[in-house]
Amino acid sequence: MTPAGTAATPARTAADAAGPDTPAPDTAEPERAARLEAALGDPFDPGNPHGHPALLRADLARHAPEATEELLAAAGLSAEFVPHGLGGRLTGLEELARVLRPVFRRDLALGYGFGITSLFAASAVWTGGDERQQRELADVLLGGGRAAIVHRELAHANAVLRDEVSARPRPGGGWLLSGRKDVVLNAHRADAFVLYGRTSEGYGSRSHSVFLLGPGQPGSGEVRRLGRVEMPGMRGAHFSGLQLADAALPGGSLVGAVGDGVSLALRSFQLSHCLIPGTVLAGVESVLRLAVRAATEDRADGQPVRRWHSVLAGVFADLLACDAMAVTGMRAMSLLPEQSYLLGAAVKYTMPGLLREDLEELATVLGGRGFDGGPLYGSFQKLVRDLPVAGLGHAGTAVCQAVLVPQLPVLARTAWFRTAEPPAGLFRPGAPLPPLDHRRLAHSGADDLLTAVLVGAAGRLRARGGRGPLENALAALADSFVAELHRLRERCAALGPAFEPQAVTLVDRYALVLAAAAVLGVWEGRAGTGDFLADPAWAVAALHRIACRLGARVPELPAQVTSALLGEVLERYRTGRSLDLYGTALAG
């Protein structure tokens, strides 16, 4: 560590940031993702049983699209949620997100309802379960079954997180579970449940434990699956209630030790903190594609009118920034699992707000088409309905806020400007990763990986000579975020142990600084590749928009920034490539 108040010596040169000693990033779509994209077909083909018209009809009728669920089952999608060591295909979150994006590009409710929630349920077992529990749950999922998660109750929670199950020791051994949850996704067809049950009357960190119920019925007592609950969004997903009355479970149903529930939740929920934004982003990407379509149709030159240039380019920059943050978080789970906890919370805290703002901007481009419920533009309104349900709305944000706020004074006093930079591979989307090891996930960590990259990247930009106008703009923006981090350190170090309202504002600002750091890390990671992400234009645009959200005084964008991003958006739209970091081929 360096002395307090001084900047850490950059751990990497600009060449090191590009990672010359590691394989070049493989931005080609994983084979399984490409096969799934092709199988789902052209989303605008009226005869496609998996296209937008069919999915919108299913949504209107409030039922799952059966033909598409059958296709996903035949593709063995449930195996994606089972670790490779247990016979599945799960080796890392980044690849899993890329496999799931073809589904989420078309329908968030389908992505959740068919099975991603099985991973969220199973992750506690992959993290803290014994070999028998892991094998039993893996067999359920590999056999095409589903697992459902029964959350513990949280203060000020929404319906998904309200009410809970209690567990008490059973005379002679085992446990008796009782309680009711009114809103559980897939409760009606789950083959196994992972339940967070209260095992202590207190409200501390040892108040809950995790139990595996199923496959099969409890030894005695009752498990009732209650009627369906209609939600305002994700209407094709099936939410219903679950009631337990003295359901008898053996001692071997306890996952981990008594009182491990909160710890297991904090460790395993990191996966969903990054995976949800990393897949939901694909739905917003589809809306940007719709906006490009709306802005260019009936235009002989294929160019949108000038007033939409900055909107389309700006939202594209936001999507790349969000993807940089999400992918960095997912890669950290494999590369640095003991240090990924705060980053995961920051991803989940920051991205929903940015994506909502982007939808609002895109609505201005869509105009009246945004209210069209038909097969061409109807997916926009569907996504607007689905997003709050998919992200658990305010509750999901509040949980991440509760994780980050207490850490601010600690980070300010011990980590900022002291932490060494992480390995360059963290910022190389698609590059090989070690297998994800759930047991190494932690809910602590004294370092702050992204602020270290911010400081290092700003220093390298400052030291480079012969820069053009874009790199000059990027260097100035990077320095402005370093200055923001200095201000945050001063304000956060002064926070006391009791909650202070200003801490919420400081968390907002801190999370945006991390988003800027992820952009710089990914841009440096692509240096020398000659592709679009190696061009500083997208990074300048992304940092400019983040700086504006912070209220920073920033100069106007160089003229070539908007034209470069708009040109890339239009080229990808015409050639059928995704509008994320990977730019991979799409069907239709």
Image (cartoon, rainbow, N blue to C red):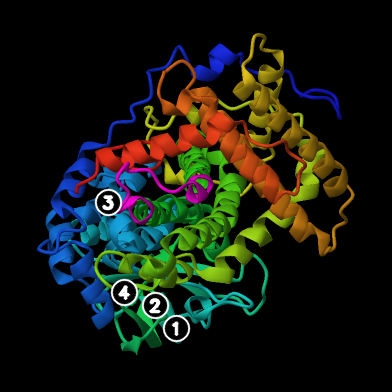
- Check residue 181 in the rendering and tell me which mark sits there, or answer none: 1
Q: Residues within 10 Å of mark 2 (few under 14, many from 20)?
A: many
Q: Amino acid at mark 3?
A: Pro
Q: Is residue 397 above or below residue 531?
A: below
Q: Amino acid at mark 1?
A: Lys
Q: Amino acid at mark 4?
A: Gly
Which residue in the protein does label 3 denote?
102
Find the distance from the CA under tag 4 to the CA under tag 2. Answer: 28 Å
Mark nearer the viewer, 3 or 4:
4
Q: Earlier in the sequence, mark 1 or mark 3?
A: 3
Mark nearer the viewer, 1 or 3:
3
Which residue in the protein does label 4 denote?
373
Magenta stretch encompasses residue 298? yes
Residue 273 coordinates in the image, percent (x, y): 50, 54
- Check residue 184 in the rendering and tell me which mark sits there, or answer none: 2
Find the distance from the CA under tag 2 to the CA under tag 1. Answer: 7 Å
Question: Are dots 2 and 1 in contact, CB under 8 Å?
Answer: yes
Residue at position x 66%, y 48% from top? 511
SS for tag 4? loop
